[in-house]
Amino acid sequence: MQLFEMIQSMGHEQVVLCSDLTTKLRGVICIHNTSLGPSLGGTRMWKYSSDEEAITDALRLSRGMTYKAAVSGVNLGGGKAVIIGDPRIDKSEAMFRAYGRMVESLRGRYITAEDVGTTVRDMEWIRMETKYVAGVGGTGGSGDPSPITALGVFSGMKASAKFAWGSDSLKGKRVVIQGAGNVASNLAEHLAHEGAHIFVSDIYEDKAAAVAERTGATVIASNEVFTTDCDILSPNALGAILNDDTIPQLTCAIVCGGANNQLKDEHKHAHMIRERNIIYAPDYVVNSGGLMNVASEVEGYDRAKVMRQAEGIYDITMNILATAKNRNILTIDASNAIAEERIEKVRHVHGTYIGSPTIRGV
Ligand code: NAD
């Protein structure tokens, strides 16, 4: 692995390897970019098959966080960490406290939170050693982010509808929702309230049935998600579902959902979607409500403010879709460019010295 080549080509500032023999901690903290503020991103615990796989994952995920924060107007940088191990059997209080001390040693350059394989309990162990952790339960904590994520997805969907059809009303629109989990069920409620025709699918039929009961949605089978005639497809389950097999089957005019990394190959599949004249609302933009929620915890959690921010995903999405159209580029390229532009401008603003110099002998 050409580590420095990789770090420099992806633009990272710092990579920290964390090791503690006694607690069997092996972790990697990646700080991608702190131009906008302290880096924030969850700690993932996973049974990686090699150190290289773990480092690559942390590098890739932390870079994604920089873009998500930048495009959503949050004053945070991008960071992410991984701990190598099986989350079902390798966890201990001592391991997470040892890891918490590593986070503390960065003095706020990196703020952690939950991710795949870590829970509120793990964050509470980390909290015993550092204050640089969000997503902890109790007073002042931001709690379950999925209602805010869903509000953001709904706002991005309305903006996409306005862009496609000239009206942001979703009344009567046929929306297929893949997944019936936390984000999907909250999204379905917004859609039901708006008068959309909802179709929902989950690999667990009881979960889809529960959403259907609450919202009047029609349950469809997992293999009908891409073929059911609809106006909007909303992926809210797993990643890589927009690929060589599924894109030719799509019947929708818009793809807009909360799932991370929906495009299996970012550029190839974004191109394929555009060639089919389907609008793709970038996933990391419309699902950034979750980040807004946890970011608010850093400044002092304010639910009303976070909801306003999530509703602002409407304007952010509209700007991205319009930019893509005007510049004749992919929507994903437009959002990346808008994120990079914000980082550069803020970096420039911060270039002005505003401190109080100490001049000796004057
Ligand atoms: P969740 O686990 O509550 O829900 C996911 C659901 O998808 C589960 O019910 C699962 O059974 C179902 N599922 C899995 N494979 C499926 C398939 N092939 N077909 C149909 N259903 C399938 O998770 P969540 O918190 O609702 O998150 C959903 C997605 O949104 C994930 O990709 C997550 O990374 C992303 N996301 C979530 C948040 C948040 O605030 N929770 C924030 C940003 C992004």
Image (cartoon, rainbow, N blue to C red):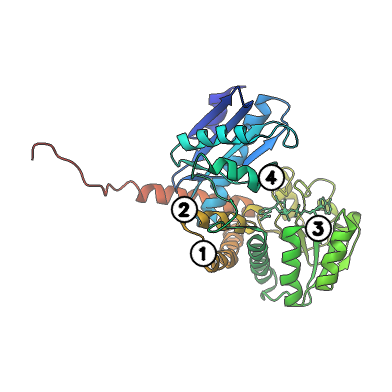
How far apart are labels 1 and 3 at the CA level?
30 Å
**Residue 121 location in percent, x, y?**
64, 45
- In the rendered image, which residue does mark 3 sit on? 178
C-alpha gap between disc 2 and disc 4: 26 Å
Residue 273 image offset from top left, x and y in percent:
74, 53
Residue furthest toward the left?
362
**Quarter holding the C terminus?**
top left
Q: Amino acid at mark 4?
A: Glu
Q: Which mark is residue 266?
A: 4
Cβ atoms at labels 2 and 3 below 8 Å apart = no
Q: Secondary structure at mark 2?
A: loop
Location of residue 249 in the rendering, given as x and y in whole percent from the top left corner: 86, 55
Q: Which residue is mark 2?
A: 75
Quick check: 190 above or below 88?
Answer: below
Give the mark, 2 or 4, whose residue is nearer the N terminus. Answer: 2
Identify which residue, 177 or 27, lies in the foreground.
27
Quick one: quadrant of the N terminus?
top right
Three-letter residue code for mark 1: Asp
Q: Secondary structure at mark 4?
A: helix
